[in-house]
Amino acid sequence: MTLEEVISRGQQREFLKLPKVLYRNDPHWVCPLDREINAIFDPEQNTFYQHGDAVRYLLKSKEGKLLGRIAAFVDEKTARVNAQPTGGMGFFECMDSQEQADMLFNAAKEWLSERGMEAMDGPVNFGETDKYWGLLVDGFTHPAYEIAYNFPYYQELFENYGFKTYYNQEGFHLDITKPLPERFEKIATWLLNKSEYRFEHFRWQEIDRHVNDFAEVYNQAWASFKKNFEPMQPAYIIHTLKKARMIIEEEFIWIAYRQNRPIAIYLMYPDLNQILRHLDGRMHLLNMLKFLYFRKSKTMTRARGVLMGVIPEFQGRGVEAAIILKLQEMFQRKTHYTEIEFSWVGDFNPKMKNIFLSVGSVPAKTYKTYRYLFDRNKPFKRYPIDGAK
């Protein structure tokens, strides 16, 4: 077997081809758009290259058959704030072979070691944590858009190599055809009747104001519990929204205010995977026409809740309940939607987990983000739970 660094256009195509071959008989896997995966490894499109670097490898048999792939990354903004310098690995795909998996993991480890890293987290993304992050270990059903999906045997490959759980993540499913719990609805209605609060959904004509308010809340809320938090820039949010303009529904994004101060946010997408499963990762003319057809015919019946955040001083006051009641009112008009997947919630954020449980959602999927220490004698520490620093 041989390892090849992905450099040429041909190798880039092979990197995209491998999962299409591996998962061809899997009824649940959905091929992401080729151009979106390519963009992650394009310095002109991925801003993380401004303070980091990435590499990709292919594993092949001596006859040239594709066997596996992996990527490794260093983000200099966050790598050296750990007890040991830590990089990342992701986009791992492999046959059910520990030998092959070990060769791929070793390639990532060696590349990271050469850049001064002493550990690697994975599988993670070279970008924001809301996509391609974590290893699915339970709930092998339809994956939501940009959410991890993999074979069950991957868990054994990771853990046999020596990866240990850094934190667990859960995905929750909510049947929106059912009424909210009575107590939850009473709390939400009580807060909505208070004059100092108001709730606005996103509008394209007010994108600058809404995005600035969104970033203000996000950066306050996440800094309160997330270790080594890196603030989100409004420009990134604008870029993300514009890229998804074809599927964005304005009433899927909400901002709560108290006396004109932004205090809470919610972001949700239609589950684009319900269309992408028909496109094989490519967006040529015929697939574009298919995309428009499926979108118009209301093929997307699920929504993916990407994030909800409330600044600390307003947590537990019913703001979250009011936002979800607003969503329920909206879904009563958009009756083709039947389900929300909230993905994902880390075990370091128990408050958000309790909110999703209180609204009637149920745990449906479990993911793990692992860490591998290069010094095998060094004591392993999990990510802090309950907001501990």
Image (spheres, rainbow, N blue to C red):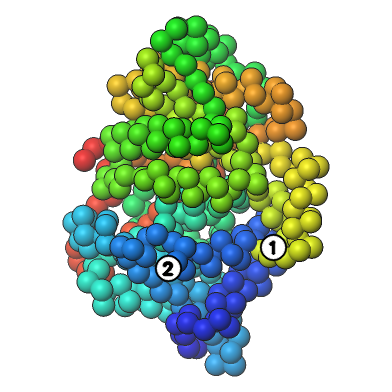
Residue position for label 2: 43
Residue 385, horizontal then vertical, whole percent: 30, 39
Helix, strand or loop at label 2? It is loop
On the rendered structure, is 202 left or right of 177? left
- Which residue does the image show at 33% across and 63% down from the upper left? 50
- Picture quarter containing residue 49? bottom left
**Residue 285: x, y in percent?**
76, 63
| Residue 117 at x, y percent in the picture | 25, 68
Residue type of the residue flagged with mark 1:
Met
Which residue is found at the position 30% from the left and 72% from the top? 112
Q: Secondary structure at mark 1?
A: loop
Residue for point 43% across, 49% down: 236
- For the C terminus, the image quarter is top left
Q: Say which of 15 and 19 sits in front.
A: 15
The residue drawn where x is 75% and y is 45% is: 295
x and y percent of residue 163 in the render? Answer: 36, 62
The answer to whether 152 appears left or right of 119 in the picture is: right
